[in-house]
Image (spheres, rainbow, N blue to C red):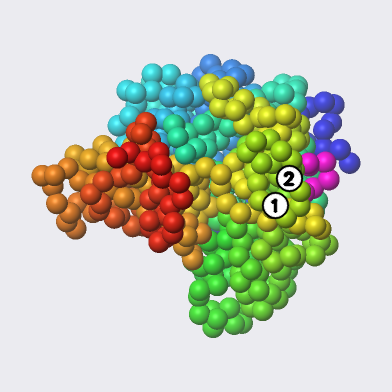
Amino acid sequence: MSIIINWQYNIGHICTRQQCELGLGEKVAFRWISARQERIDYTFSDLDRESNRFANVLQSLGFAAGDILFTFLPKSPEQFFSFLGVLKLQVICGTLFSNFGDDALVDRLVDAKAKGIVTKKSFLKKIMRVRDQIPSLKYIIVTDIEEHLSADTLSYPALMREASANFIAPPTSPNTPSVLHYTSGSTGKPKGVLHVHRSILHQSRTASEVLTLNESDIYWCTADQGWVTGTSYGIIGPWSLGVTQIHYGGGYDAKLWFDLLQGEAVSVWYTAPTALRMLMREDVKLYKGYELNALRHIFSVGEPLNPEVITWARTTLGKDIYDTWFQTETGGIMITNRPGLVIKLGSMGTPLDGIDPAIIADDGELLENNIQGNLCLKTGWPSMFVTYLNNESAYNSKLKNGYYYTGDTAVRDDDGYYWFKGRSDDVINTAGHLISPFEVESALLEIEEVAESGVIGAPDELLYEKIVAFVQLHKQFSWSRELEVKIRLHISNRASSIATPQEIIIVDGVPKNKSGKIMRRVLKARYLGQDAGDISTLED
Ligand code: AMP
């Protein structure tokens, strides 16, 4: 059955109203499990009503199609209601990771000219600190205050109490803008990856074809809604298929996670390699006594999935883990292992039908099997991003001869399997989060004692890559434990806690080329004790 009825592509509508019209109104859409283990079930009718209310709230505040609103929330029911309500009104929904610091917030909200933000009381201080820098921001809607604080800092419960539960999403074309996620590059500010409602075709298809979701599943996706996996596969894909999800508001806790997998009878679980490696490090006794009979499949995304983890899952859990590859710009899974396909340990699997990757050399030559090059995708898949907001030149620079350059390097073997090799730029992947070395370097330079800095990603057994910062201090300062704490706090507050370096190395100078660009390649080679290659452009 096609998910598109009467040419209505609206993601908010398809994930809620349409499920009710298909007879699933009283089915549980998600079981909310708070960090304190309280449980509340929300049906598809609840999801429809609450998202309708939120669409009406926004409309009454003057929001209209094409405006941009961000959610800046931890996982919570309000995250789902507001995301779907925003989309119903054809407003664009940006999602922000709740750990973001001041600079990270300002960069994104200013670039997008955000008109509104939905947040929690405990994050208000952060927003108020930077508010003056975001002139476009008209409304701050706070999910956990009972009364409005001012004319523009409003109580979500109070607004929702007044709003009608009826809203009909306007007919929405496949090309109507929908979701905005920011992604980090190795230079410059983060780029706003803009998607359109058409993406639901691919997200729904892959939720069914790869994740094998069907109406009888209980599905758990651990990703935060601040990232693409959290929206494509924690909201859109599963709910477009009427699947019941569990959403858990707490963090990593091995025993609790196993209690959830068993107790909630989770049948399909989508998580990330760092979490799986953390589980692998736990004492095997922890898993004794669990019967994960309902669990049919485990999937992983975000970083390379090392063979040891798959082997561990086979021996400890008696299950395979299927590695899937995609990125913010692709909007959905492109290359993947999946049930029915023989897993080659360490490979990302094969492309889906209709997805046409190529391995291309820097000079544009299409490469044969078994030769490493740039991983590219023939343009035109349904969930392809449509631009980097306000940065058409960056978008165009990623497109050549009908291919989109993903920024990853890979190899295709003779059986058509793809093997991830690394990034073609300096972007760091730590625990599945892309971090811009430039953002960390900029934050470091704001610190009075720091004269120069260079930041690299270095291999790490748990995180895949750790962040290593090389710091040169101004002559009058010396290294101390206090300075280290100051640096860590500063980066956490300005960028995010996940951007905080695992290692800080004090150096006498940071290598730069003759035009003043930091030579991270040289720093990395020195750190790893390798040959730095051609250093003829190094500054004297
Ligand atoms: P993001 O856009 O933040 O979702 O990050 C996407 C990037 O994460 C990709 O371009 C890869 O570098 C990395 N990535 C995602 N999935 C995988 C995977 N299965 N194996 C290796 N790297 C991955």
* Quadrant where the image shows the C terminus: top left
In this picture, is 473 found above or below 161?
below
**Residue type pointed to by label 2:** Leu
Q: Is residue 147 visible?
A: no
In percent of width and height, residue 531 lies at: 44, 56
Helix, strand or loop for the magenta stretch, by majority? loop
Q: Does residue 23 appear to the left or right of 463 in the view shown?
A: right
**Element at label 1:** loop
Q: Which residues are magenta?
A: 351-356
Mark 1 to mark 2: distance in Å?
Answer: 6 Å
* Residue type for callout 1: Ile
Q: Is residue 338 visible?
A: yes
Quadrant of the snapshot with the N terminus: top right
76 left or right of 146 in image: right
Task: Name the outermost residue toward the right.
Answer: 1
User: Residue 7's spot in the image, x, y percent?
Assistant: 82, 26
